[in-house]
Amino acid sequence: MCIFASCNGSMMNKIRQYIQLAALVVSVCLSACTKEAEEEESTSKSMKGYLHNDIPSFVFRNDYVTVTAYGITDPAEPQYKWYASGISDTLSAATVTIHFPDSLGTFTVTDFSSYTGYYTSSNSRDVATVDTTFNTSLKNVVRSGKSFLDKRDNKHYSYETIGNLDWFTQNLAYSGAGAPYMGSPVTGFFFGYYYSWNEATGGISAEGLGCGPQGVCPEGWCIPTNEDWEDLAMAMNGGEPLAFSDKWQGLGSKASANATFMGIDMWNYSNETEHTNDFGWNALPTGNTSNNHSDINGFDSYGFWWSATQKNDKQAYYRYIFYDYDNFPMNYTAKEDFGASIRCVRVAQ
């Protein structure tokens, strides 16, 4: 018993020694690895530039969208990767094509920029898929049943006869000039494009009922003159004429639609006015652009529409609706710097 006890104790001491030695080796290794990681971390540096991408905020259902990451200047050739939640596996390239699903939803798309010795940079954006079917993504607008096909790009426009004229009941979305909201063809489909006065009219001022220049409108249609606007006002005002310079009290409510886009009210809330859309003109608060369409102003608060009639060589007239007033007044501004919407008209057919 004593010999066995002695041997057992000796063996236990050796085991303890081995454990202590192993622990020491692990400790040294961990210390070295940690130190190496810390040294590597301390030598990493931030990338120069800012990671940008051209991911749109809205895309059509079942759409293939090509997007590009850019903006990093150092390192010169970083590695780019993309991840679209719930859509695709990681894609590795600066420019990739993402196939969005044939369903409505919001998806987070993230691009990453990485390079050995640099901290990784990333940028994310939520992208919503939209449906072009009438009264689905954009709701509470009216369609008259009258439709016109613009053969230049095969876009359909609803129109309504109001007074002596046929009026588009949606903003022109011809992409041969101007720019859409946020640079997206999707928003252009719903809200139309912004045009400077010169882009809209071709620089041609006109007067008289149905006598506006074609400008960016389809063949057979024209940019409305001051007299065309007055004809619209008289029809909306129960046959009583209103001068172009008048504020058109109450007509802002009658011309504007209480629309929602992706479930969100387009007009800011106001307890001063309603959007009754009595004539199906469907005015929306798409705002205006400036600085060559690079800046967007007043979206959800204002709607602006050009007249083909100029005030002078540098300025032209427009009409607008503000969310907190029920009128539909006029104003004038620089022909080049201001971007507004277009409603095409023609003498009633």
Image (cartoon, helix red, strand yellow):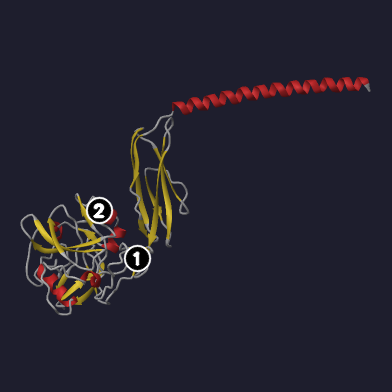
Q: Nearer the viewer, residue 174 or 339?
A: 339
Above or below, comparing residue 28 to residue 68 in the picture: above
Q: Are marks 1 and 2 in contact (CB under 8 Å)?
A: no
Instruction: Calculate the distance from the C-alpha at mark 1 to the C-alpha at mark 2.
Output: 19 Å
Q: Position of residue 253 (x, y in %)?
A: 25, 70
Q: Amino acid at mark 2?
A: Ile
* Residue 128 location, quadrant: bottom left
Q: Nearer the viewer, residue 272 or 122?
A: 272
As helix, strand or loop, the secondary structure at mark 1 comes to: strand
Measured as percent of width and height from the top left, residue 4 is found at 90, 22
Measured as percent of width and height from the top left, residue 69 is found at 35, 43
Give above or below for 202 relative to 76. Answer: below
Query: Going 57% across and 23% down the picture, which residue do you hit?
Result: 32
Residue farthest to the right, as pictured? 1
Amino acid type, label 1: Thr
Q: Quadrant of the N terminus?
A: top right
- Which residue is labeled 1 in the image? 260
Q: Give x and y (percent) for residue 33.
A: 56, 26
Residue placed farthest to the bottom in the image?
239
Label 2 environment density (alpha carbons within 10 Å; few <14, some 14–19, many ≥20):
some
* Residue drawn at 88 percent across, 19 percent down: 6
**Considering only order in the chain, which callout, 2 or 1, is on the residue closer to the N terminus?**
1
Q: Is residue 307 above or below residue 179?
A: below
Specify the farthest residue to the front.
Answer: 272
- Residue at point 30%, 59% (across, down): 187
**Residue drawn where x is 93% and y is 20% of the image:** 2
Question: Which quadrant does the C terminus fall into?
Answer: bottom left
Tell me the element at label 2: strand
How many discs appear? 2
Q: Which residue is mark 2?
A: 296
From the viewer's perspective, is 277 left or right of 263? left
